[in-house]
């Protein structure tokens, strides 16, 4: 395997690791906080609304947007690390 292929393989492994972690967070926030943990979260109020309701309606959207920015930042660092930056 050439050096370029080794770099590409290592790059892809790190990319998949980041994707797996971020998708797990996405799943936990959207499915877990909005559905599974709703009853426990509803004991807490945020701005007058039950926290389970808030996560189902607004919180998960905010987390998704934050995850997009986190992914962009991680990929920019990864691109620089492996020399794929512009």
Image (tube, rainbow, N blue to C red):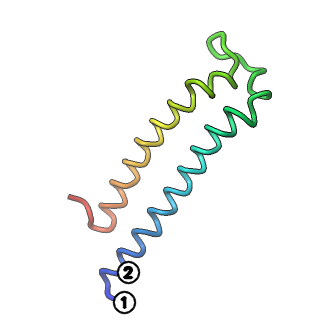
- Residue annotated with mark 1: 1
Residue displayed at 32% across by 68% down: 82
Residue displayed at 56% across by 32% down: 60
- Residue annotated with mark 2: 6
Side (left or right) of 78 relative to 51: left
Q: Is the residue 5 above or below the residue 74 in the image?
A: below
Q: Residue furthest bottom?
A: 1
Side (left or right) of 57 relative to 50: left
How crowded pointer 2 is (Cα within 10 Å; few <14, some 14-19, many 20+) is rated as few
Indicate the position of residue 31 as horizontal and vertical percent values. 66, 39
Nearer to us in this view, 36 or 12: 36
How crowded pointer 1 is (Cα within 10 Å; few <14, some 14-19, many 20+) is rated as few
Q: Is the residue 58 above or below the residue 36 in the image?
A: above
Q: Is the residue 47 above or below the residue 42 in the image?
A: above
**Earlier-in-chain disc, 2 versus 1:** 1
Cβ atoms at labels 2 and 1 below 8 Å apart = yes
Please, what secondary structure does the residue beneath circle 2 have? Answer: helix
Indicate the position of residue 17 as horizontal and vertical percent values. 52, 62
Which quadrant of the figure has residue 45?
Answer: top right
Which quadrant of the figure has residue 9?
Answer: bottom left
């Amino acid at each position: 395997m050439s050096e370029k292929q080794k770099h590409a393989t290592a790059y892809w492994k790190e990319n998949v690791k980041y994707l797996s972690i971020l998708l797990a967070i996405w799943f936990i926030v959207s499915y877990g906080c909005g559905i599974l943990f709703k009853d426990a979260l509803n004991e807490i109020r945020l701005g007058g609304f039950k926290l389970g309701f808030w996560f189902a309606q607004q919180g998960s959207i905010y987390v998704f947007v934050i995850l997009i920015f986190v992914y962009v930042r991680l990929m920019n660092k990864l691109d620089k690390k492996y020399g794929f930056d512009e």
